[in-house]
C-alpha cells in the first residue's frame, strides 16, 4: 500500500486508470479478507437447465397444495385461511368425503411430472451418447466400459458353476460342452 501511495502522489489519472486502480485495490482487500485468492462471479449460471427448474418448481407447487389439502382433510386449523379459501374455491370442496379423491389428483400429477422428468433425462442422455458415438467412438466405448465395470467382488468359478448347476439341475462344465 505504501508503494502505491508513493507512486500515486502528484500523478493525474484519467477516469479509466482510476477505476482500474480502485478495482485492483478492492480485489486485493477482498483476497486478504477472504483468503481465496481468486475472483468469482456472483451471478454464475445455474448448472441445471431451465426446463428442469420449471418442472421442479411445478412439482413443489403441487406438493404445497397437496399438503394444504391434507391439512384441510385433517381439519387442521393451522392452515392459513387465505390458502384454505383459495384451495376450497379451486377444487370446489364441499364435503370432506370428496377430499380423498381430490388428494389423489395432485399425487398423480407429481408422479406424472417425475416420470416426464425421467423421460426427458433419458432422452437427453441418449442424444448425448448418439452425438458422442458419431464424433468419438473410442470415447463412447470407454464411457460404456466405465459404467459397467463397477463390479467390486467378482464371483469365483465354483460359485458361478454352482449357480448355473442349480438353474439347469445337472452338472454343467463349459469345457466338456465345447469338446463334445
Image: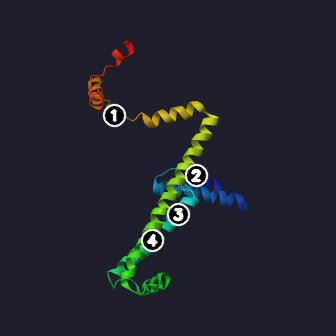
**Residue 176 location in percent, x, y?**
33, 15
Circle nearer the N terminus (2, 1): 2
How far apart are the two marked residues, 2 and 1, measured between alpha carbons?
A: 60 Å
How packed mark 4 is, by other alpha carbons closer than 10 Å (few <14, some 14-19, many 20 or more), is many
**Residue 145 location in percent, x, y?**
47, 33
Which residue in the protein does label 4 denote?
Answer: 106
**Viewer-proximal residue, 152 or 101?**
101
User: Do callouts 4 and 3 mark residues in contact (Cβ within 8 Å)?
Assistant: no
Circle nearer the N terminus (1, 3): 3
Circle nearer the N terminus (1, 4): 4
Which residue in the protein does label 2 denote?
Answer: 3
How far apart are the two marked residues, 1 and 3, measured between alpha carbons?
A: 36 Å
How packed mark 2 is, by other alpha carbons closer than 10 Å (few <14, some 14-19, many 20 or more), is few
Q: Quadrant of residue 105?
A: bottom left
Which residue in the protein does label 1 denote?
Answer: 152
**Residue 121 location in percent, x, y?**
53, 52
Please identify, in this view, whether the residue under mark 4 or under mark 2 is nearer the observer.
Answer: 4
Q: Disc 2 on helix, strand or loop?
A: helix
167 displayed left or right of 135: left
Circle nearer the N terminus (4, 2): 2
Amino acid at each position: 500500500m505504501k508503494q502505491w501511495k508513493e507512486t500515486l502522489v502528484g500523478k493525474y489519472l484519467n477516469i479509466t486508470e482510476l477505476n482500474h486502480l480502485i478495482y485492483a485495490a478492492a480485489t486485493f482487500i477482498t483476497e486478504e479478507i477472504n483468503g481465496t485468492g481468486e475472483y468469482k462471479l456472483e451471478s454464475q449460471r445455474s448448472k441445471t437447465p431451465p426446463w428442469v427448474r420449471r418442472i421442479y418448481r411445478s412439482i413443489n407447487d403441487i406438493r404445497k397444495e397437496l399438503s394444504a389439502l391434507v391439512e384441510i382433510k385433517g381439519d387442521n386449523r393451522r392452515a392459513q385461511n387465505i390458502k384454505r379459501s383459495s384451495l376450497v374455491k379451486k377444487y370446489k370442496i364441499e364435503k370432506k368425503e370428496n377430499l380423498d379423491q381430490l388428494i389423489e389428483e395432485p399425487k398423480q400429477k407429481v408422479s406424472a411430472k417425475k416420470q416426464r422428468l425421467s423421460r426427458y433425462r433419458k432422452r437427453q442422455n441418449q442424444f448425448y451418447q448418439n452425438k458422442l458415438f458419431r464424433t468419438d467412438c473410442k470415447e463412447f466405448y470407454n464411457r460404456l466400459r466405465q459404467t459397467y465395470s463397477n463390479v467390486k467382488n467378482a464371483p469365483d468359478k465354483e460359485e458361478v458353476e454352482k449357480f448355473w448347476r442349480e438353474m439347469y439341475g445337472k452338472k454343467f462344465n463349459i469345457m466338456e460342452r465345447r469338446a463334445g
